[in-house]
Image: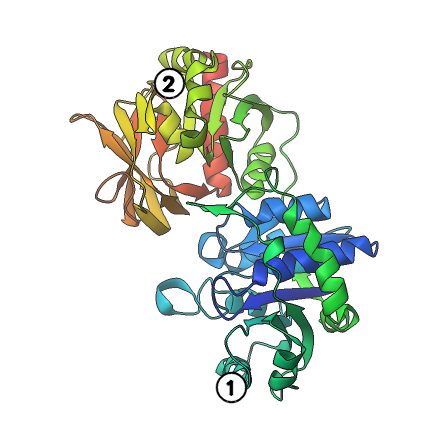
């Protein structure tokens, strides 16, 4: 039976990508944490990178909230489970506040705000404008009456005169006036910002928010929220029945925490290892997530783990790989040089320097990939700059009704019980159970 959850919560939305919402959201988390609050962070959408900064700042794992991949009930379930023990939830939005799937509302920041009945702080980049900012705020405030804009943070204020020219907004109260601070910029690259382990800059935004924002006003808005229904998650199945090795290091770092949780509930023990500088541990299956294998190709090529993985695949071990993991399973990667990879899948990888695919995916398992049950349906996301050149007789285990995949709506290149796909999947319970059952079969063989 569902229970209710009463927790202060606030959504940090932006007028558009690049307006500063990540700066404000991360700064708000840091400022609240510095005051002693237990902050539970979230990120709207499928992004893997911003949550690493949230996690570093808050000391609690940031969770993705994506209605397309999870469904509305899944958003509520993840939110409720993650918020236990927290004092306040801060939810960073994605893109512009109303930018959703195929130009609609689904999976937008506004959609998540409505699902969670959470007020919104709107971040507006005012560089190059003054009074026009009010027209912008008024339009956002009136666009969807179901979205409650608690206030506005004006970002990139150029001077005291610039602030005075903007003046007091009429459509929503001003909750912050952040000056232009190029010295606190976080570097980015082809898949987004650098990861939290590479740059601590985000945590420094807490002082900026504390100085230039009405933190008490933002907390007050977060507290003016009703209790939410809190769906109960199923407990873990008991004693683990199989061990799944998870590649996790600087090359393989794109994972949804919900996927780990579902694997554990399905009966898996997760054993983390580094393909860059370690050897393959004793496991019954492998999960190779996405990341940046192209940036660490020399280390991956030189590591003995590469031959360990090939040997395990030849022995029939179930191996499930996504994006960067797919690249690692191919024969070689070409970009700034050419480096051998694990050679599990009959394909080569080429880094292209431009986006090859970006967007949501709907997939169905076809053929007989071994690692996942035939007919399984799931959703996910793809975003990559590489191109896979498969062998002429390559077999594909996924048929996509939405998305590009490896080629022409086909994804999930497989050999024996190893499958690699460009799709970053959001696991369902059935998906996790399928992967764990494959590991159990290998364990008992």
Marks 1 and 2, how far apart at CA? 56 Å
Sort mark 2 into few (<14), some (14-19) or many (20+) by Cα contacts within 10 Å: many
Which residue is depicted at the point 53% across and 46% down? 49
Image location of residue 214, percent across then percent down? 75, 72
Above or below, comparing residue 213 to residue 436 in the picture:
below
Above or below, comparing residue 209 to residue 298 in the picture:
below
Image location of residue 80, percent across then percent down? 67, 55
For mark 1, what is the residue?
135
Q: Which mark is residue 444?
A: none
Q: Nearer the viewer, residue 95 or 416?
A: 95
Sort mark 1 into few (<14), some (14-19) or many (20+) by Cα contacts within 10 Å: few
- Quadrant of the rendered image containing residue 396: top left
Q: Secondary structure at mark 1?
A: helix
Residue 2 in sight in this render: no
> The C terminus is located in which quarter?
top left
Above or below, comparing residue 305 to residue 117 in the picture:
above
- Quadrant of the rendered image containing residue 349: top left
Which is in the foreground here, disc 1 or disc 2? 1
Which residue is depicted at the point 26% across and 22% down? 346
For mark 2, what is the residue?
342
Question: Would you say 80 lies left or right of 146 here?
Answer: right
Q: Secondary structure at mark 2?
A: loop
């Amino acid at each position: 039976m569902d229970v209710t959850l009463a927790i202060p919560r606030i959504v940090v939305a932006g007028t558009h990508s690049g307006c500063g919402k990540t700066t404000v959201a991360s700064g708000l988390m840091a400022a609240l944490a510095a005051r002693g609050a237990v902050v539970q962070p979230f990120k709207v959408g499928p992004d893997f990178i911003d949550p690493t900064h949230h996690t570093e700042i808050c000391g609690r794992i940031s969770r993705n909230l994506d209605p397309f991949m999870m469904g509305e009930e899944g958003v509520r379930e993840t939110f409720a489970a993650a918020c236990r023990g927290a004092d306040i939830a801060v939810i960073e939005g994605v893109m512009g506040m109303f930018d959703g799937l195929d130009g609609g509302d689904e999976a937008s920041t506004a959609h998540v705000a409505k699902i969670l009945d959470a007020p919104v702080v709107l971040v507006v980049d005012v560089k190059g404008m003054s009074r026009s900012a009010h027209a912008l705020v008024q339009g956002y405030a009136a666009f969807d009456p179901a979205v409650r804009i608690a206030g506005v943070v004006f970002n990139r204020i150029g001077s005291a005169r610039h602030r005075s020219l903007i003046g007091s907004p009429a459509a929503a109260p001003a909750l912050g006036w952040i000056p232009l601070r190029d010295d606190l910029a976080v570097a980015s690259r082809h898949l987004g910002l650098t990861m939290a382990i590479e740059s601590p800059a985000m945590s420094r935004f807490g002082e900026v928010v504390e100085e230039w924002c009405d933190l008490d006003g933002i907390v007050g808005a977060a507290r003016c929220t009703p209790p939410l229904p809190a769906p109960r998650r199923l407990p873990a199945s008991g004693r683990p029945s199989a061990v799944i090795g998870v590649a996790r290091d600087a090359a393989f770092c794109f994972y949804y925490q919900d996927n780990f949780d579902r694997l554990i509930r399905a009966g898996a023990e997760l054993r983390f290892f580094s393909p860059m500088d370690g050897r393959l541990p004793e496991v019954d299956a492998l999960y190779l997530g996405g990341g940046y294998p192209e940036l660490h190709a020399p280390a991956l090529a030189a590591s003995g783990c590469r031959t360990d993985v090939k040997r395990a695949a030849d022995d029939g071990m179930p191996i499930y790989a996504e994006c960067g993991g797919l690249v690692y399973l191919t024969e070689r990667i070409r970009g700034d040089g050419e480096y051998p990879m694990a050679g599990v899948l009959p394909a080569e990888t080429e880094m292209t320097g431009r986006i090859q695919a970006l967007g949501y995916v709907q997939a169905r398992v076809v053929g007989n990939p071994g690692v996942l049950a035939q007919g399984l349906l799931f959703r996910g996301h793809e975003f990559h700059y590489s191109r896979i050149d498969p062998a002429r007789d390559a077999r594909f285990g996924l048929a996509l009704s939405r998305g590009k995949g490896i080629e022409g709506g086909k994804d999930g290149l497989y050999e024996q019980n190893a499958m690699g796909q460009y799709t970053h999947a959001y696991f369902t319970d059935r998906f996790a159970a399928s992967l764990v059952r494959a590991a159990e079969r290998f364990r008992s063989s």
